[in-house]
Amino acid sequence: MSANHPFVLTIAGFDPLAGAGVLADVKTFEQHPVYGFAINTGNTIQTEDAFYEMQWTDLTFILKSLDKLFKNYKIKAVKIGIIPSLDYLKEIVSTIKKLSPKTKIVWDPVLKSSTNFNFLTIENQFTLIEILKNIDLITPNYNEILQLTVEKYSIENTASILSEFCSVLLKGGHNTDAIGVDFLYIKANVFKLLPNTIIAFEKHGSGCVLSAAITANLALEQDIKMACINAKKYIESFLQSNPTKLGYHHV
């Protein structure tokens, strides 16, 4: 493998449509000069319009796979998607950091009722903070970010508070005041990422694709701000690719 094609890894669910999850992530990696690996956190039954069932992968199996991959390859960046619990996420993140402390980690917090997440206790909030300290970037949308705190803060305040522990890309797809405007929080700095086009079609798995593109860019030694800016260009091309909910990947 050439030096300019670093290894990256997605740890996420399997979507049979390949619109989201590990299949979408690997498609995205393939459009960047990186080589993508994948670990499946669970199988799903779904269409682009409905989610029916989730069958989770045993955590022990995930950790064994991580051990083998990291001991055989230099993985520059990891994207984590849907997972069943904070404890599951904590074990994955801590294992990555033990095996490869310099590997960049992006978490796309897919927070649906089917994932059995519970952020309603102080204990879980403390666990979340400890996890975030070992993550480089999280990519919540306007609905998801409010589930990442037990306090009733505003969306902007929540993003600012969480950015004390890791960088936060607040995705603007659900921003009713300014559709498509993202906000990147890096410590005390906030960067407004404006859309490059007003033409876009709703796509199944667009959040997965964006976070995977960011992960690829981080593996290519781009800083977080530039990785997000370039990933935004990629996702806009994906959203414009056709009028259906299943997008095409191309540069």
Image (cartoon, helix red, strand yellow):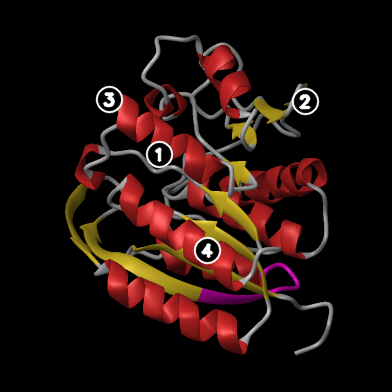
Q: Position of residue 197 (x, y in %)?
A: 72, 33
Q: State yes or no: residue 69 in magenta.
A: no
Which residue is label 4 attached to? Answer: 25
Question: Where is the C terminus found, in terms of image quarters?
Answer: bottom right
**Crowding at mark 1 (Cα within 10 Å: few <14, some 14-19, many 20+):** some
**Span shown in magenta:** 31-37
Point 48% across, 74% down: residue: 38
The residue pinned by badge 3 equals 120
Amino acid carrying label 3: it is Leu
Q: Which residue is mark 1?
A: 127
Nearer to us of marks 4 and 2 is: 2
Instruction: Give the label, 3 or 1, closer to the camera.
Output: 1
Q: CA distance from mark 3 to mark 1?
A: 12 Å
How far is the residue under mark 1 from the one under mark 4? 27 Å
Of callouts 2 and 3, which one flags the residue occurring earlier in the amino acid sequence?
3
State the image coordinates of residue 29 (x, y, percent, origin top left): 63, 68
Quadrant for the N terminus in the image? bottom right
Marks 4/2: CA distance? 25 Å
- Mark 3 and 1 residues: CB-CB less than 8 Å, in contact? no
State the residue in front, 94 or 33. Answer: 94
Q: Circles 4 and 2: CB distance less than 8 Å?
A: no
Nearest-to-viewer mark from 2 and 3? 3
Q: Which type of secondary structure does the marked residue at label 1 adopt?
A: helix
Neighbor class of circle 3 (other Cα within 10 Å; few <14, some 14-19, many 20+) is few
Image mark for residue 191: 2
Between discs 4 and 2, the one toward the N terminus: 4
Q: Amino acid at mark 1?
A: Thr
Looking at the image, tell me whether mark 3 or mark 1 is earlier in sequence order: 3
Judging from the image, what secondary structure is the residue with disc 3 in?
A: loop
For the residues carrying marks 4 and 3, which lies nearer the camera in this image?
3
- Amino acid type assigned to the residue bearing label 2 in the image: Phe
